[in-house]
Amino acid sequence: MTEKKFDPVIVGFFCNWCTSAAADLAGTSRLHYPASIRPIRVMCSSTVDPVYLVRALQEGADATILGGCHPGDCHYITGNYKARRRVAIVKTVLKSLGFDESRVLLEWISGSEGPKFARVMNEYTEYIKNLGPSDFKYLDSLGGEKLD
Amino acid sequence: MTENDILVKFIKDAFDKGLIEAVMAPSATKDSYTYALITKKEDVDKITPIAPVMQWNGADMIRRITKLKKSERKLLAILRPCESRTYKELVKFNQINPENIIVLTYDCPGTVHARNFKYEPTSADKLIDDMKNGKISNKIRESCRVCEYPTPIKGVGDIGLGIVNTNEPVFFSLSDKGKEFLAEMNINEGERDDSTWVKLHRDNREKWLKEERITGGRKGLEEFLSSCLNCHNCKDMCPICFCKECFFEDHSVFDYESNKFYNWADDKDGIRLPTDKSLFHVGRLIHMGTSCIGCGLCQQACPMDIPLYRLFGIVGNDLQKVFNYKPGVNDDLPPVMDFREDELHEFEGLFGGEE
């Protein structure tokens, strides 16, 4: 009998101008990155309401990534600075309540960094695999670890 | 003369001198106190400027008055210290137009839970006596017992009334506007030392921040919120939750085809409905936690007596530490309205810091 291998689901919100372009570049450069990443293209990292990051976690994702342009390179001038504040808020809330805040990741990947994109996705998937399934998705459900 | 009498006299004098045209202050109802807007001098006797309960946040009431247009008349608002901080925070959020409004605040004895007050009434004078004796009664609400700023702060509001540590209550100015106002009222500014009263609360707060923290991730949060009705009362009472359209009220955000629900139930070994119960509180923390004033009205509004201020106050305190921000205390912009180019690198990447 083979044990079922844990295959994480990672939802990525990637900005249209940088990280999504990097994903394309990684693809056209034939660089491999794991299929556990579910990319969602958004116009800017700051268009993602921080609640969507935790909502993805609750609805079944094991981790979420927010990808934007490097600071100073935002297509909309200041979007990624705002996104950084929002991710800081989400991570602090998760940490305060005793959840693992590393399940939310903020990465700056520019359009020309295809190899970095593939490397980050590989490393993060490996990291989440070692961490195991998230317990946040069992919030308000009957499954997961038994609660007394 | 009690402190309330002194304030009533102050308001009447201000009407006489034509310095104000309206006053907003608490007024007694059968079982509680609500805010009243008074425009005539002869009605001033109907108000109780220092009330033993806080049913609503006064700053939220001013927000309603100035929602469409600035205050047309000169308004004197009698607010508690927490409400005056809310007022300042809402001015920063462009929710209140401060033009034509004078805020008077005072050394706060704390308030009783509105429901307890209904069945076991008490008077403001009794609470003020306790305060003068340096005692925090155990009937006072939890959020008041652990209040960080129970007295007026310079720069928040316009006029302060000092009650603790003084034989006769003293007026003092908190802003230039207040200084002018007191000068025109021919009132000499006084001084008093409030440090003991503040320290009493800060000590309580330190202890409370350590002991009442909700930890344990999913288990801790689910147990804490286990009796939540998802009524959204905490959000309705929260003065910082002023959005016209709330993320969590727009139910189309949570509309899914039935398959989705069945699939979740498959994956998670059964789900609890509605599915956004805990997410609502986590989401609200993310949206307003950085500006949580600490009025504790969320906790008072909870029909199931969940001590919600432990969630919003303690996590809010953590958030405010990250941004080195104290809501409603100084002129810094709220963290969600502002950014720096070089900051928060520990939140970037997997292990903090950019490569």
Image (cartoon, coloured by chain):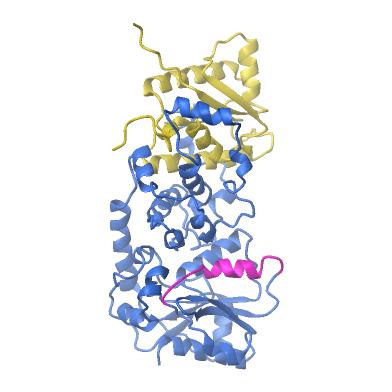
Residue B355 position in % (x across, y down)? 49, 26
The quarter holding residue B346 reads top left
Q: Is residue A56 above or below residue B245?
A: above
Q: Colour of chain A?
A: yellow
| Magenta span of residues | B52-69
Q: Residue furthest top?
A: A1
Relative horizontal placement of residue B168, taking residue A80 as reference (left or right): left
The quarter holding residue B12 reads bottom right
Q: Is residue B322 above or below residue B95?
A: above
**Front position in the image: A137 or B322:** A137
- At a point 65% along the width and 76% down the height, the residue shown is B100
Relative horizontal placement of residue A4, taking residue A54 as reference (left or right): left
**Front position in the image: B148 or B115:** B115
Q: Say how many tags the image has.
A: 0
- At a point 39% along the width and 31% down the height, the residue shown is A135
- Which quarter of the rendering shows the N terminus of chain B? bottom left
Q: Colour of chain B?
A: blue
